[in-house]
Amino acid sequence: MRRENDRFTSPHALQLVWRTRGKIVDRTLSVVLDDVQGGHRLSGKEALALFKTRDRQVWEIAAAADEVREARAGNAVTYVRNQNINVTNLCVNACGFCGYSKKPGDEGIYFHDKAAIQKKVALAGKRKCTEICTVSGLHPDFTAKSYTDVYRWIREAAPGIHLHASNPMEVAYAAKKSRMSTVEVLEAMKEAGLNSMCGTAAEILVDDIRKKICKEKIPTKEWVRIITEAHGLGIPSTATIMYGHCETDRDRVKHLGILRDIQDETSGFTEFVPLSFIHMNTPIFRAGNARAGATGREDLLMVAVGRLFLDNFKNIQVSWVKEGIKMAQLSLIAGANDLGGTVFEESISKGAGATNTDYLDPVEMERVAEDLGRTLRRRTTLYELL
Ligand code: SF4
């Protein structure tokens, strides 16, 4: 922790200035960070000021987030042995940030049937995975039963494995196609073996931005309702943000505020996973409507500000798939405590232009953890240490 008399003496102290009820409030960065470490809940305005930080103050924020990480989640760097299965890339939507989905007639369409899925599940067993993670395109012929069939096939092939699947968009789609309520779909999915849900399809929970990047996706209100319903049914989920395209710092703060409010209400999020936009093969980037992804400063600040702002989250996961292992390692000293999964098979980020996304060997995870003086620990999906 900083010493009391350091608060006003740093030659590089950043003045955070914003208006509260018409008054200018003026505080140094070090005071704000000390307050957070002392239990103060960051306001949206404070988080916005932190996101706008440039220069060496980024390291101060990262260091404060790292201290909070140590106090809240300990020193272990965790990971899960998981296998991804994307059942199909055929999708009725056309999200502007997606380089993965295909339309009928496109080259490279795939659809894995029961035999192919069960073969992958058997392979996951041989690889000693404890989790199968599956999300897919919104296949034109899918109904709620299509999803529950897939979960039953997975369950049949690996009864004890944790099934981490679906997301609020898939639940809404299944409900619409089968004329069911989203609660009924979630109950059917749980009955078929769903253990936890992916908090994806959140992207940025600001409707103006959603209209620009994924206008066919469910609006913010519906995403929030479905994730809250899932938590209410005892289906925990991850929480994600996809950033670095056309959103502003203010949008990022709004998004984090929504996640924090849901967590206050349900405690159903297992972790926060920032997903840095992979731009290369995406329609919005090619049309000139998105930036070429987040910068390194933004990646570090998303983890660090996420750690400081989301005071009701224990775990912050950094995605080596999105950021590469070197940025992922730096994120582990900026607030993150988890490296995600081994993955074994990845198509979504690869479709958008990322490379080396298929598998990260725990030996490499151990190397980067030990390089920071930390220990790598294997965990379950729900963060029990193995
Ligand atoms: S992000 Fe998902 S819903 Fe959107 S086009 Fe891609 S696969 Fe379809």
Image (cartoon, helix red, strand yellow):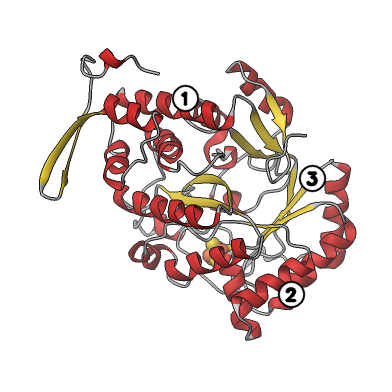
Residue located 65% across and 65% down the image: 233
Query: Quick one: 319 or 310, which is closer to the camera?
Result: 310
The verdict on label 3 being within 8 Å of ligand 1 is no
Q: What element carries label 1?
A: helix
Give the image location of residue 304, x and y in percent.
Answer: 43, 34
Side of 82 relative to 369 (left or right): right
Mark 2 closeness class: few <14, some 14–19, many ≥20 residues within 10 Å: few
Side of 296 relative to 167 (left or right): left
Residue 130: assigned label: 3
In the image, residue 72 sits, relative to residue 170, either above or below, namely above
* First-in-chain label (1 vs 3): 1
Question: Closer to the N terminus: mark 1 or mark 2?
Answer: 1
Task: Kindly identify the residue that appears in the image at 53 percent across and 45 percent down.
Answer: 272
Q: Are marks 1 and 2 in contact (CB under 8 Å)?
A: no
Residue at screen point 52% across, 37% down: 323
Crowd band around label 1 with a 10 angstrom C-alpha radius: few (<14), some (14–19), many (20+): many
Q: Where is residue 109 in the image (x, y as percent from the top left)?
A: 67, 66
Is 270 on the left or on the right of 343, as rendered?
left
- Residue 146, which numbered label? 2
Kindly indicate the quadrant of the structure image that contains residue 90.
Answer: bottom right
Q: Using the image, tell me which numbered label, if any, was put on residue 67.
A: 1
Residue 102 marker: none
